[in-house]
Amino acid sequence: MTLDTLRATDALGADWVVAVLLLMLGTLAWINMVSPKKWRLLAHAFFGLRLGKQRMRDELDLQDRTLVGLLVMSAVLVALFTYQVLVLHGWVAPGLARFGKLFVYVLAAMVAQVLLIRGLGVLLRADGGLTEYLYTVVLFDIVLGLLLVPITVLLAFPHRLEWRSWLWVAGLLFVAAVVLFRWVRATLIGVGEGVPLRYIFLYLCTAEILPAALAYEQARHFVPIPTNPL
């Protein structure tokens, strides 16, 4: 089966999916042109155990247009990957409108988490590593989007259709690994700032694990549509 035939008959390779992927690749090209050092910053921030106050002060700005662009790109790619998995298993009907709703949900979840961390800082009237963790959350969301670029492209246009049976699993493993590593970083940041482990555990349960569990529970209530998986 050629790629042209696949795109004409396969919901995961629809024309609007091609447009979304091209837009994402264009965003990466633009950021590489205007801020090529951003990739080194993301690599250091992701693989280092702590960000460091100097790096947060000198290199990170949450209002930086390239970081904002990368964060929106990440939301698009997470939503697209979620859409691909749901459609692949026949759990939702395909279509741009469905993807649009998923994008709104993902972006709202990212913004809500940032506001939650900001709100905790105001409520507790202490930092306790919350500022560093806020930067960590944003950077990890961006890295997750970058990791999902090849997965979403290959799910849309696999060399062989049977590749999809493991590509979506690989994508979920990427998501799980990034989230777990983020929780490890949260623990390291809190301990490094002298926060008791019980408070770190309470935060992870209420602001990280509980929302994830609720999202999973909501996903279980999707009613499969009577179609065969792609």
Image: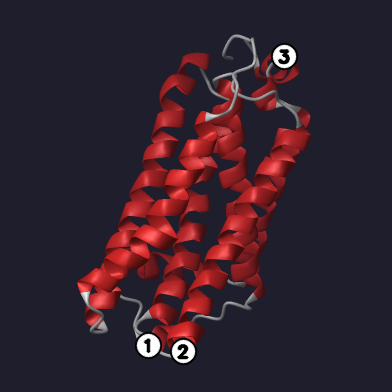
State the mark number for residue 57. 2
Residue 17 vs 66, above or below: the answer is above
Does the CB distance between marks 2 and 1 fall below 8 Å?
yes
Quadrant of the rendering where the C terminus is positioned: top right
- Whole-angstrom CA distance, mark 2 to mark 1, is 6 Å
Residue on which the image places disc 3: 9
Question: In percent of the image, x 37 and y 45: which residue is there?
Answer: 176
**Distance between the alpha carbons at the discs numbered 1 and 3:** 52 Å
Q: Is residue 149 visible?
A: yes
Under circle 3, the secondary element is helix
Residue 69 in the figure: left or right of residue 42:
right
Q: Which amino acid type is marked by label 2? A: Arg
Work out whether 11 lies above or below 75. Answer: above
**Spatial CA span between label 3 and label 2:** 50 Å
Measured as percent of width and height from the top left, residue 204 is found at: 35, 62
N-term mark: 3 or 2: 3
Which x, y percent locates residue 50?
Answer: 30, 75
Residue picked out by circle 1:
53
Q: Give left or right: position of 71 versus 147.
A: right
Residue 36 appears in the figure: no
Q: Residues within 10 Å of mark 1 (few under 14, many from 20)?
A: few
Q: Nearer the viewer, residue 8 or 199?
A: 199
Residue 9, horizontal then vertical, whole percent: 72, 14
Of the image marks 1 and 3, the number of the one nearer the N terminus: 3
